Image: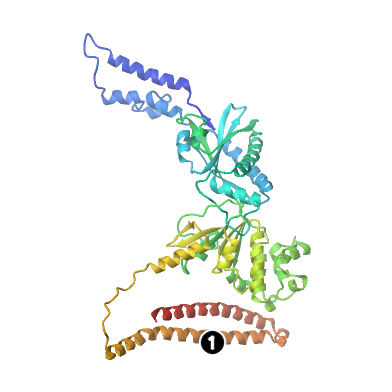
Amino acid sequence: MADEIPAPAIEDAVSGAAATLEADATPDSGGAAERVLNQEEIDSLLGFDVGADQAQDKSGVRAIINSALVSYERLPMLEIVFDRLVRLMTTSLRNFTSDNVEVSLDSITSIRFGDYLNSIPLPAILAVFHAEELDNYGLFTVDSNLIYSIVDVLLGGRRGSSAMRIEGRPYTTIERTLVQRMIEVIMQDMCAAFEPLAPVNFSLDRLETNPRFAAIARPANAAILVKLRIDMEDRIALLGQNGNGKSTFIRLISQRLEPREGRLKKTPKLRVGYFSQDQEEGLDFEATPFDHMARALGPGAGEAKVRAQLGRFGFSRDRANLKVGVMSGGEKTRLLLALATRTAPHMLLLDEPTNHLDMDARASLVDAINDFEGAVVLVSHDTHLVKMVADTLWVVQNGTVSPFDGDIDEYQTKLLKERGARPAKADKPVEAASKKDQRKAAADNRTNKAPLKKAVDSAEKMLARLTEQMNGVLTRLADPAIYTGPGSVVTDLQKEKARLEREVANAEKRWLAAQEALEAAA
């Protein structure tokens, strides 16, 4: 809402300035009508006299400037009103969208209305509303990302697919209508937020897409700018090469790592769920999934609540009563996911969730993520999972995280082009080679490829050795007699199995990298 410059202040300041000029321009006994002002007179005209900062009353152009500024700190009740509005909007928008919506207050600042209009990122929808009791107008600005998100959620087109956005086209009637409905919901909340302070009725006047047609005050007028952030169920996949910091980034978000520099800013009420394959080592292999969930939910949780949470991740009564030590890798993964989501988090962080999962379990995971009512940040090398779940891609590289404007196929195409654009060796003129030269070239080629072939052989032997060790551990775990002995034996075997699974996965990656290097040198 904008506050106009008090007209008397302008008139007094201008009149004072004009009188000064008129007096200075009056000829003295036939003298010249024009003269040059000195610095002291210029400062007096502009209102920048020495000691003016301590004076209560300012004059000249400075008075005109200051009359248009409204300090947000002079309106302390605004923070209370908009804090109440945030709580009301969170509830109302959740009911409006049937989705998990979080509203937060970013900032309250004072700004000139013209500067704000010029800073609006387009395309956007601007809603002009009238505050009847205040006899004033306000302006809602809804950016394009929120418009598309609201439309996708209300029309059911968000799950498992990216929204189709055609930049530069005008908003359709359906899009404008849905945004108008959302704004009407927010205005009802504004009325309720102002009610304890002063009853104010807000009514929608019109919708605009051009800021010039949404001018509710003169450009020089002061306005209070309130920025609200509306977060819906984002599905974000982190992309980047190994070692670029994808896992480190989500550990920072989950506060499992403290930032070395800067700070992490989030609302105190934000609940975050975190999943990583490393958590498997923390499971009690002698306990059952039911025991794990009952301990995590606390003593106040009844059996029905515990089994309901486990049932969401495919644990029947019988499977929930089995010891974790005899469960498959996929079942352990599902148990960790069930534990990560037990508190209905607003944000779920997943670090390689499809490891050890078979095809059916991966399909179930896709359904579970798409049905999850909250934001998801995903790190995965599973391209199919990213396609089915993520609607936003962030690239982690060179110590930064930035959005990628495209889908996973476009990202892979971009990587291939970058690799193909590397400078190739200069072509040498073709010369007739003698048999001696050919034999020497073949020998040099074998010499150059020898370290690569040795790396492939070494990786194969390491993979075979680890696989043999894994088979030995699995054979012992399959022996029923082992479960009649001390429980520590089973626990140690399960930990060894988890360690070997990670080493086998790393060995496979090393073998694949060595094989690709050998083929490239051929």
On the picture, is 143 further left or further right than 417? right
Q: Could you say where residue 228 lies in the image, as x and y percent from the top left?
A: 56, 44
Q: Which residue sits at x=70%, y=62%?
A: 297
Q: How is the image coloured?
A: rainbow
The mark tally for this picture is 1
Q: Is residue 283 visible?
A: no
On the picture, is 116 further left or further right than 37? right
Question: Which residue appears farthest toward the top when viewing the image?
Answer: 29
Question: Which residue appears farthest toward the left when viewing the image?
Answer: 31
Name the image quarter holding the N terminus: top right
Q: Nearer the viewer, residue 20 or 374?
A: 374
Q: Which residue sits at x=47%, y=62%?
A: 396
Q: Secondary structure at mark 1?
A: helix
Q: Nearer the viewer, residue 242 or 391?
A: 391
On the picture, is 318 further left or further right than 512? right
Q: Could you say where residue 454 lies in the image, as x and y percent from the top left?
A: 42, 86
Q: Quadrant of residue 456?
A: bottom left
Q: Nearer the viewer, residue 368 or 42?
A: 368
On the picture, is 361 further left or further right than 120? right
Which amino acid type corresponds to the residue marked 1 in the rendered image?
A: Arg
Q: Which residue sits at x=65%, y=87%?
A: 475
Q: Could you say where residue 516 lies in the image, as x and y percent from the top left?
A: 45, 78
Query: How packed is label 1: few (under 14 Cα within 10 Å), some, or many (20 or more)?
Result: few
Q: Which residue sits at x=63%, y=79%?
A: 494
Q: Quadrant of residue 518?
A: bottom left
The answer to whether 131 is drawn above or below residue 505 in the figure is above
Q: Is residue 87 visible?
A: yes
Q: Could you say where residue 230 lies in the image, as x and y percent from the top left?
A: 58, 47
Residue annotated with mark 1: 465
Name the image quarter holding the C terminus: bottom left
The answer to whether 97 is drawn above or below residue 19 in the figure is below
